Amino acid sequence: MKLVVLPGDGIGPEISEATIRVLRLLDRRLSLGLTFETHEIGLARLARDGSTFPDEVLKAARAADGIILGPVSHSDYPARDKGGINCSAHLRVQLDLYANIRPARCREGIAHYGRTPLDLVIVRENTEGFYADRTMFMGTGEFMPTPDLAIAMRKVTAQGSRRIAKAAFEIAKTRPRRKLTYVHKVNVLKVSDALFLKECRAVAGDYPDIEADDQLIDSMTAMLVRDAQRFDVVVTTNMFGDILSDLASELSGSLGLGGAINAGDAHCMAQAQHGSAPDIQGQDKANPCSLILSAAMLLEWLAGRRGRPTLRRAAETIDAAIDELVKSPETRTGDLGGELGTKAFTDRLCAEIERRL
């Protein structure tokens, strides 16, 4: 299985290197059959070739069995017609990665910030919504009729709502609590969110054994802080999901411990939840856990499609090893109150994985 690695900007190359090191170890010990193909993207590629994401990279990603994408500094990119393609958004649209799946759970030794511990999965629609680069066939979903008036359009389709609801129900089937919550703002967005909610409820008919309810987005943010343990799997539209998943990860202890995949019917991409952190670039300070956990989720996704139990074992080993290391400040990175840099933490993680295998 070929994994295409796109290290990205800022701390992306450092945490990508740590992630590949962990995967190579697991490949060697468990005979996973992984190969790696790295392509430069982002600001470095723009300086070299005039584009942050040349067509050849998309072609390689499309042909791969899985993709690992490091953080990108797309806010610093020039306009698209000047070569500034948002790598993450481009891959999500071109490969139809419609499900952004972000688990968040409390881990022993890491303080959580809500009133109750949490263990949930947020399933976010990834290709529609208010995001301007995913709204229109031509142009964007934002425009200015006059210099002092800006308008943003929101796109919600029945098909997009139906398939993200099905993805969320399928995840709920695999969890002990078997519960799903739809998050919306139907009291204000009476057309677009009404369509989303209608499709979620229609899909629920195919899953009678899953308990389903719904929450308004504003009450959902309050309840995540007040009583997060009432939630199991959450499904919502693009922008709401983007915000809620960052909130949930931070409430659970740290955005740096939040894994994520962008999945479709044919492709899957691992991507850290956090940004490129250029302020610590090259200083050996970055926490690589988010991208490593995302890579573990990619292995789990591949295991389900290839019928390969060893891939699932590899994913579970990564998760358990990180659980063990973050229990103690002596084996944490600086952002989690520890003293280890990126390379030293990766050394300890590899040693813990070796011990468990």
Image (tube, grey):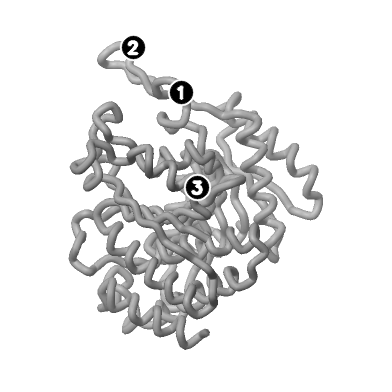
Secondary-structure class at tag 3:
helix
Q: Are marks 3 and 2 in contact (CB under 8 Å)?
A: no
Q: Residue flagged by tag 3: what amino acid is it? A: Ala
Looking at the picture, does residue 233 appear above or below residue 82?
Answer: below
Residue shown at 43% from the left, 33% from the top? 131
**What whole-number distance in Å separates the C-alpha atoms at marks 1 and 3?**
33 Å
Q: Mark 1: few, some, or many residues within 10 Å (few <14, many ≥20)?
A: some
Tell me which numbered mark, 2 or 1, is placed earlier along the sequence: 2
Secondary-structure class at tag 1:
loop
Q: Are marks 1 and 3 in contact (CB under 8 Å)?
A: no
> What residue did someone put label 2 on?
145
Q: Residue flagged by tag 1: what amino acid is it? A: Met
Residue shown at 50% from the left, 47% from the top? 63
Left or right, residue 112 beside residue 305: left
Secondary-structure class at tag 2:
strand
How far across and how far down the image is residue 242, in percent?
A: 45, 45
> What residue did someone put label 1 on?
153
Nearest the camera: 115 or 170?
A: 170
Q: From the viewer's perspective, is the residue at label 1 or at label 3 nearer?
A: 3
